[in-house]
Image: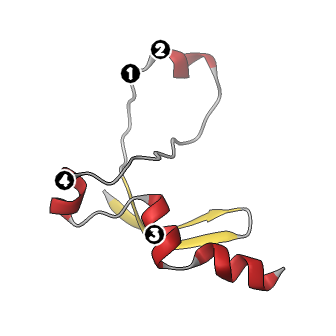
């Protein structure tokens, strides 16, 4: 797990926890070209216990959409 600044278009989310792996055994992903997987997990007890915020929780807490709207 690492902390990273995530950018999706003009949307910026700082200090997002990202899980890293060098091998993924999911047959569906063998048929497409990809360079990463963005999880959209719901907050749950395990994540909270580890102090990990989901992407959407960080977007809300950091007011990233509000800031993006102000730029446009």
Residue beneath label 2, please? Answer: 27
Q: CA distance from mark 4 to mark 3?
A: 17 Å
User: Which labelled disc corresponds to residue 58?
Assistant: 3
User: Which labelled disc corresponds to residue 35?
Assistant: none
Mark 4: few/some/many CA within 10 Å (<14, 14-19, 20+): few
Task: Indicate the colouring scheme.
Answer: secondary structure
Residue beneath label 1, please? Answer: 25
Q: Mark 4 or mark 1, which is nearer the start of the sequence?
A: 1
**Nearest to viewer (mark 4 / mark 2):** 4
List x then y, in percent, for residue 58: 45, 69
**Nearest to viewer (mark 3 / mark 1):** 3
Element type at marker 2? helix
Q: Residue at x 47, y 47 (%)?
A: 40
Q: Residue at x 34, y 64 (%)?
A: 53
Marks 1 and 2 close (CB-CB < 8 Å): yes
Q: CA distance from mark 3 to mark 1?
A: 28 Å
List x then y, in percent, for residue 69: 75, 78
**Which residue is the extreme one toward the right?**
72
**Nearest to viewer (mark 2 / mark 3):** 3
Q: CA distance from mark 1 to mark 2?
A: 6 Å
Q: CA distance from mark 1 to mark 4?
A: 26 Å
How many marks are shown on the rendered structure? 4
Marks 4 and 3 close (CB-CB < 8 Å): no
Q: CA distance from mark 2 to mark 3?
A: 30 Å
Residue beneath label 4, please? Answer: 45
| Residue in the foreground of this view, choosing between 38 and 43 | 43
Q: Mark 2 or mark 4, which is nearer the start of the sequence?
A: 2
Element type at marker 4? helix
């Amino acid at each position: 797990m690492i902390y990273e600044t995530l950018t999706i278009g003009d949307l910026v989310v700082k200090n997002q926890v990202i899980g890293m792996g060098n091998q993924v055994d999911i047959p569906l992903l063998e048929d497409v070209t990809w360079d990463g997987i963005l999880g959209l997990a719901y907050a749950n007890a395990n994540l909270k216990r580890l102090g990990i915020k989901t992407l959407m929780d960080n977007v809300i807490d950091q007011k990233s959409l509000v800031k993006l709207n102000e730029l446009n």
